[in-house]
Image: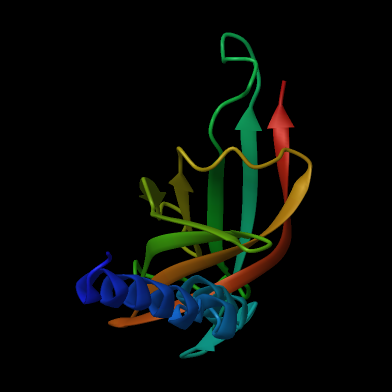
Amino acid sequence: MPSIKNYFVFALLISTLFACEKEEDNQPSIKDNQIAALLSSPEMLNLNNYLLKIESDIWRNFMPPIDSNGSALMAQVVLSERNQRTLNNSVQLEKVYLINQNELWSKTFDSSDSSSPYQVSGMVRNGPTWGPNIKVDLVCEFSFGGQTYRLLAKDQDIYATY
């Protein structure tokens, strides 16, 4: 004859199963909120009379001797002062974010170059294997005058080199 203890364990198990509810179905995820915040970044920014904008090249390499699946994604980002005013090393590139629908990838810049007086460029490597021939949104995070800012470049093509 089953003991009261067995009935209690069974009742607890059943109530736990019915009481469980996925919170993620009822609330947006942290990643969704982060993507929405990134996509609200401006495409051009005026900081202390510097008019800043970004441009990018995003690609994957399929040239031999690379594996036929291609290399991981690479991106070059150029932050420019649109009126060609000298930036005097006042801009430091920090991080790039790539958004492919509901997927998000980010990385700090592998390298940067400020040899142009009115541009700063940076490179990231070893990204996801998205594309080629798709569009993504790119957000560049940078510092200027001790503050952190972000700029958005929408609908950037991922192309392939063969």
The residue depicted at 54 percent of the width and 85 percent of the height is 27
The residue depicted at 63 percent of the width and 64 percent of the height is 102
- Residue sticking out furthest to the right: 133
Given residues 61 and 93, the one toward you in this image is 61
Q: Residue 70: where, in percent of width, then height?
A: 61, 24
Q: Is residue 63 above or below residue 54?
A: above
Q: How is the image coloured?
A: rainbow
Q: Which quadrant of the figure has residue 83?
A: bottom right
What is the number of callouts on the image? 0
- Residue sticking out furthest to the bottom: 48
- Residue sticking out furthest to the front: 1
Q: Residue 159: where, in percent of width, then height?
A: 73, 38
Q: Which quadrant of the figure has residue 74?
A: top right
Question: Is residue 87 among the parts visible in the rendering?
Answer: no
The residue depicted at 57 percent of the width and 9 percent of the height is 65
User: Looking at the figure, which quarter contains the N terminus?
Assistant: bottom left
Q: Is residue 20 above or below residue 103?
A: below
Given residues 113 and 97, the one toward you in this image is 97
Q: Residue 116: where, in percent of width, then height?
A: 47, 55
> 144 left or right of 86?
left
Q: Is residue 19 above or below residue 48?
A: above
> 112 left or right of 49?
left
Question: Is residue 127 among the parts visible in the rendering?
Answer: yes
Q: Residue 35: where, in percent of width, then height?
A: 56, 73
User: Looking at the figure, which quarter contains the C terminus?
Assistant: top right
Q: Is residue 72 above or below residue 45?
A: above
